[in-house]
Image (cartoon, rainbow, N blue to C red):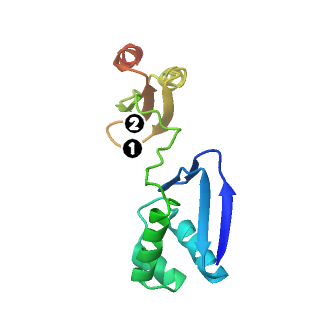
Amino acid sequence: MIIKKCKLNYAIFIQTIIFLNINYLKIIMVSSKNHIKTFEILKKVNTKSKPNISKISKELGITRQTFQNKFEMLKDKGIIKNFTININPNIRPNLKYVILEIKTNPKEPHIVEDLLKIPQMKILDGIFGEYSLIALFVFNDSDEFNKVLLKV
C-alpha cells in the first residue's frame, strides 16, 4: 500500500464542479494503476457542464458501478469536499443589458457618429428591414439608461 501525503495551505478550486478544502490530502492506493485511474476520474469530472458518468466510465475503460464506487470513495475520504458552479467573474450581474433597434433616416448620416460617442454602447451593427441599426448598450442602473435614452 502506498500513501501519498500533500500539505495544502489553501483551498483548491478545480474549474467547475470540484472544490477541495483540506489541510492534508491522503490518497491511498493499492497499485499505481488505481492511482492513475483516480486522477483520470478527477480530470474527467472537471468539465464545464454536468459530467456524463456513462461516457466517462466508457472512456476510462471501467464500468459505471466502478466509477460510482471510486467517486464515492473520493467523497468519503474528503478528496472531493463538495460541488459548486464557477460563475464567470467577467460578468457583472447588476448591469443592465439593452438592445435597441434604431430607425435611421438617410438624410441624417451623423447619427452613427453620435451613437459611437456614447460610452455605454458596446456594439453597433447595420441590419436589413424596418430598423437599420441595432445597438447593444450596458448600463449600471435604470437612471443611466434613461439619461442615455434621452440622448438617442
In the foreground, 102 or 36:
36
In the foreground, 142 or 34:
34
Residue 111 is situated, as x and y percent measured from the top left of the image, at 47, 22
Residue 136 appears in which quarter of the rendering? top left
Question: Dot 2: within a 10 Å radius of its alpha carbon, few (fewer than 14), some, or many (20 or more) residues?
Answer: some
Give the Cα distance between marks 2 and 1: 6 Å
Residue 148 appears in which quarter of the rendering? top left
Q: Quadrant of the N terminus?
A: bottom right
In the foreground, 117 or 112:
117
Classify residue 57 as left or right of residue 35: left
Q: Residue at x 44, y 50 (%)?
A: 85
Residue annotated with mark 2:
132
Residue 146 is situated, as x and y percent measured from the top left of the image, at 35, 16
Question: Dot 1: within a 10 Å radius of its alpha carbon, few (fewer than 14), some, or many (20 or more) residues?
Answer: few
Q: Residue at x 52, y 86 (%)?
A: 61
In the foreground, 145 or 21:
21
Label pair 2/1, CB-CB below 8 angstroms:
yes
Q: Residue at x 47, y 70 (%)?
A: 73
Classify residue 150 as left or right of residue 61: left
Secondary structure of the residue carrying tag 2 is loop
In this rendering, the answer to whether 19 lies above or below 42 is above
Residue annotated with mark 1:
128
Secondary structure of the residue carrying tag 1 is loop
- Three-letter amino acid code at disc 1? Phe
- Three-letter amino acid code at disc 2? Ser
Q: Which mark is residue 70?
A: none
Classify residue 33 as left or right of residue 15: right
Give the residue at the far left of this rendering. 130
